[in-house]
Image: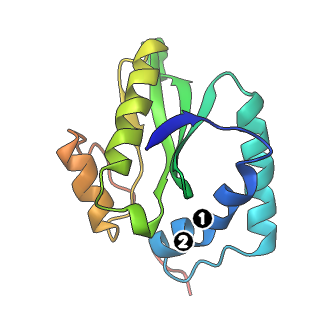
Amino acid sequence: MRIRYLDLPGDMDPILATLPDLYESNFPGFVADSEFVSRKKGQIRSASRDPGQTILVAEDAAGLAGFIWLAIEEEWGGTGTRGEVAALYVRPEYRGKGVGRELMAEGEAMLRRYGCHKVHLMVTRSNESAVRLYEELGYKVTRLQMEKSMT
């Protein structure tokens, strides 16, 4: 397994192909339609030009195994910078083989090099394998997001 920086345009289609699984599995009822995918395509292009964002790709001879999308942001109150894992995705056939751990380790190392003193991420409660991975990597719940249906 090799982890490298995003290479556009070559990585665009393989990453876009993962979006239905990434979003629909985390948000039941969500549909990654063509408008959503188009919007994400623009965001990936923007991220590739933004020095405060990085996308790393894990690949082997068969192609894309997964990716991690990182962002650097100012901490509230001006106490420094922190990193954000905006997205982590591992293709189903690579899950449970350490790819997510490798991507997280490389991402965290990169954020440290940029001077980040902490990193945060969001994960849906229903994504039990991701929650378990993050807990094993030392992540703790620091806030809750609550939701109410109005229909």
**Mark number displayed over residue 18:** 1
Q: Are marks 1 and 2 in contact (CB under 8 Å)?
A: yes
Say which element carries label 2.
helix
48 to 58, vertically: above or below: above
**Front residue of 80 and 94:** 94
**Front residue of 63 and 148:** 63
User: What residue do we see at 77% from left, 53% from top?
Assistant: 41
Which x, y percent locates residue 26? 46, 69
Q: Amino acid at mark 2?
A: Asp
Q: Amino acid at mark 1?
A: Thr
Say which element carries label 1.
helix
Q: How is the image coloured?
A: rainbow
Crowd rating for badge 2 (residues with CA inside 10 Å; few <14, some 14–19, many 20+): some
**Mark number displayed over residue 21:** 2
Residue 54 position by quadrant? top right
Q: Is residue 147 visible?
A: no
